Image (spheres, rainbow, N blue to C red):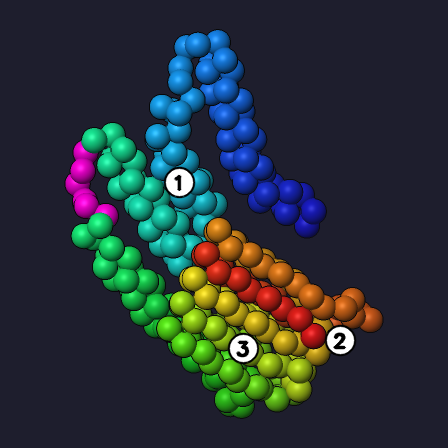
Amino acid sequence: MKSEIASKNIPSQVFLGLGVIGLGVVFLLDNLGYVEFREVMRYWPALIVLFGGVKMLEASSPHERMTFGIITLIGGVLLLNRLGLHLFNMRNMWPLLLIIVGCVVVYRALVGRRAMANVMKVDEDSDSVADVTAILGGYDRRITTPTFRGGEVTAIMGGCNLDLRGSSIEGDAVINVFAVMGGITIKVPPDWAIVLEGTPIMGGFDEKTIVPPNTAKRLHIRGYAIMGGVEVRN
């Protein structure tokens, strides 16, 4: 198990190391007078393309590949503009971002509902599965069930508050989160062990829970926080 986790983390560490090495090389060449640091930094979108490409190779699901594919595409457009190939005028094309966000919402809704439909075949308790979405607004929901199984929480330029303190888990449960310029707060009972498996992109994941007496009940938090935040507390 430890070897699998280590091998999975290697690509991200390699990416970070190469970035530091590249930055050091640019500074060195600038000090020696071969290049000008300010001129090189004009092409910073190449870092976005590199980051998105590496994450696409690491992706283990179609949703992850689509998310990082969009990031790579945006970086490529910015890089082409820096190279003088103005294929898009970002001032006029900003609605494209809304279209992309909308496509992501539709995709997550369809995939998420299929997954939850499979769960509901096993458990008919509607409160066992959470389906929370907030777009340009706020959404508060409290769930009390002895058999919570997980669900989907999405916040796009809005906020979601999911209160699970009156619920319980039989073993493990998984919540997939997706926050874009928004915030998600999940409140859990003190006897739940939290496993954060999310990816922050100019955002953050924050856990503010006490250490449970054991790990018999585990809640896995997976997904993305893009210019947003996900907080888990009790």
Name which of mark 3 and mark 1 comes first in the sequence.
1
Q: Is residue 105 left or right of residue 226?
A: left
Residue 180 location, quadrant: bottom left
Disc number lying in front (2 or 1): 1
Tag 3 and tag 1, C-beta contact below 8 Å = no
Mark 3–mark 1 distance (CA, rounded to whole Å): 31 Å
Q: Is residue 84 left or right of residue 31?
A: left
- Residue 126 location (% of width, % of height): 50, 89
Range drawn in magenta: 85-90
Mark 2–mark 3 distance (CA, rounded to whole Å): 20 Å
Name which of mark 2 and mark 3 comes first in the sequence.
3
Q: Residue at x 21, y 31 (%)?
A: 84
Disc number lying in front (2 or 3): 3
- Residue 1 location (% of width, % of height): 68, 50
Q: Nearer the viewer, residue 197 or 5?
A: 197
Name which of mark 2 and mark 1 comes first in the sequence.
1
> Is residue 88 one of those drawn in magenta?
yes
- Residue 155 location (% of width, % of height): 44, 70
Which residue carries the number 1 mark?
48
Q: What residue type is disc 1 on?
A: Ile
**Under tag 2, what secondary structure?**
loop
Q: Is residue 103 left or right of residue 164?
A: left
Secondary structure predominantly adopted by residues drawn in magenta: loop
The dot on residue 3 is none
Which residue carries the number 2 mark?
191
